[in-house]
């Protein structure tokens, strides 16, 4: 592609349908690219994205992590540690990290496996259906509901709010309205729930949060609500789309399904490879705190920089044969969950849920294909790659 013809916008539906060809062109010809529609720079090479993620002093999260021209996303939401810099970020992360220790995650395995078994059994017995509605959406919603201590019967509402938060229709007169309405509804829900936990604590994460202290003081109401919003969306949306994307990729590779069915020990590496091959979070942005010269391009302090995890994970300099899916690839450097101080706390839980889903699914069927009755519907989200609906036949 001639350099003058290169166009990239994370909100372009054509890019959302298949971003990988334009990623390859960005890496090859414009590793530092100016995206005029989003008013931001774009980094696409593995080395550059990885270095930026590990330099929070220069690449700050405090002014927001989503590129949205003319809209102050950081100011639109209550404080979340994903949009904070040290030292406050580090203090708050230590509070919530206690819920995601390897020991705590291991304790969840039995209950997650039971949920996965029930949902996959229904899907297979029905001969297929909409994976998002029947499996990849409900499972993470139930897991995060149990973790937070909120009723499972609210999971459908959680899914609706969560999807609205990450979906943006840039053609609408007020593109962010659905995002803000969903955030407001979630804040109100959790405000009432936090009041209940203060009055009647239980052995769950919500009760732990309302009694937690940072530097000798309790978390503020805004900080608690920010935590709840982040945990719901980050703990739910990423896993939903990882499961859906994996279903779709494997549907086109029956020989891989057969191999996994015969050797379940390959599931952990297959999940890791899926995270690299088709990352559910394609990229997040940072704001420069100083001028940066990279690949002979001058970026200025205050500029927004979009870091493309999805492109970095397809960089052949980091991953040989990067555009091909290899389930036995040793993937220990992929950036689907970020890197550095903002590395996703729920990474181990997301991988556990996905591994158990496919362990249960492969116990019941060795074949599925994309349904012919309804075409897959992509999420229209800048940072998130996944499906609004994905029908399969079994």
Image (cartoon, grey):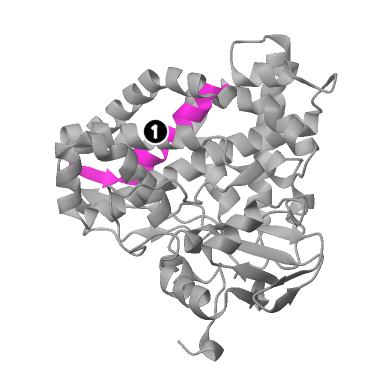
CA neighbours of label 1 inside 10 A, class few (<14), some (14 to 19), many (20+): many
Identify the image quadrant of residue 68: bottom right
> Is residue 188 visible to the viewer in this orientation of the structure?
no
Give the image location of residue 320, x and y in percent: 36, 62
Look at the image and give the residue range highlighted in magenta: 125-148
Identify the image quadrant of residue 263: top left
Residue 143 lies in the magenta-colored region: yes
Q: Is residue 178 left or right of residue 72?
A: left
> Is residue 211 visible to the viewer in this orientation of the structure?
yes
Q: Tell me the residue at 76%/67% (across/down).
A: 303
Residue 170 lies in the magenta-colored region: no
Q: Tell me the residue at 30%/54% (across/down).
A: 248
Give the image location of residue 217, x and y in percent: 85, 20
- Relative to 332, residue 15 above or below: below
Give the image location of residue 177, x and y in percent: 67, 56
The residue under label 1 is: 353
Q: Tell me the residue at 16%/44% (across/down).
A: 259
Q: Tell me the residue at 80%/38% (across/down).
A: 87
């Amino acid at each position: 592609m001639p350099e003058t013809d290169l166009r990239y916008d994370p909100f372009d539906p054509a890019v959302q349908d298949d971003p990988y060809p334009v990623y390859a062109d960005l890496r090859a010809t414009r590793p530092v690219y100016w995206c005029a529609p989003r008013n931001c720079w774009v980094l696409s090479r593995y080395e550059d994205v990885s270095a930026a993620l590990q330099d929070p002093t220069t690449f700050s999260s405090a002014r927001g992590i989503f590129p949205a021209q003319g809209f102050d996303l950081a100011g639109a939401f209550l404080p979340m540690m994903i949009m904070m810099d040290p030292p406050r970020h580090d203090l708050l992360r230590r509070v919530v990290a206690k819920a995601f220790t390897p020991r705590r995650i291991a304790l969840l395995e039995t209950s997650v496996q039971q949920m996965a078994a029930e949902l996959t059994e229904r899907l297979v017995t029905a001969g297929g259906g909409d994976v998002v509605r029947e499996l990849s959406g409900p499972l993470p919603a139930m897991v995060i509901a149990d973790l937070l201590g909120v009723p499972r019967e609210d999971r459908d509402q959680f899914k609706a709010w969560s999807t609205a938060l990450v979906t943006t229709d840039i053609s609408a007169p007020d593109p962010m309205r659905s995002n803000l309405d969903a955030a407001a509804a979630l804040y109100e829900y959790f405000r009432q729930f936090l009041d209940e936990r203060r009055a009647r604590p239980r052995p769950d994460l919500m009760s732990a949060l309302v009694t937690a202290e940072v530097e000798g003081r309790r978390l503020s109401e805004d900080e608690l609500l920010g935590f709840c919003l982040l945990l719901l969306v980050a703990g739910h949306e990423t896993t939903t789309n990882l499961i859906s994307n994996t279903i779709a990729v494997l549907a086109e590779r029956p020989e891989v399904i057969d191999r996994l069915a015969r050797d379940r020990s390959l599931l952990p590496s297959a999940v890791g490879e899926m995270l690299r091959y088709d990352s559910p979070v394609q990229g997040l942005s940072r704001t420069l705190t100083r001028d940066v010269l990279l690949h002979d391009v001058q970026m200025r302090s205050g500029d927004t920089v979009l870091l493309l995890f999805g492109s970095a994970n397809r960089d052949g300099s980091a991953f040989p044969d990067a555009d091909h899916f290899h389930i036995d690839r040793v993937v220990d450097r992929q950036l689907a969950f970020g890197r550095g101080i903002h590395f996703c706390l729920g990474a181990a839980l997301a991988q556990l849920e996905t591994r158990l889903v496919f362990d249960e699914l492969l116990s019941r069927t060795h074949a599925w294909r994309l349904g012919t009755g309804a075409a897959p519907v992509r999420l229209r989200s800048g940072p998130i790659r996944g499906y609004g609906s994905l029908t399969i036949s079994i």
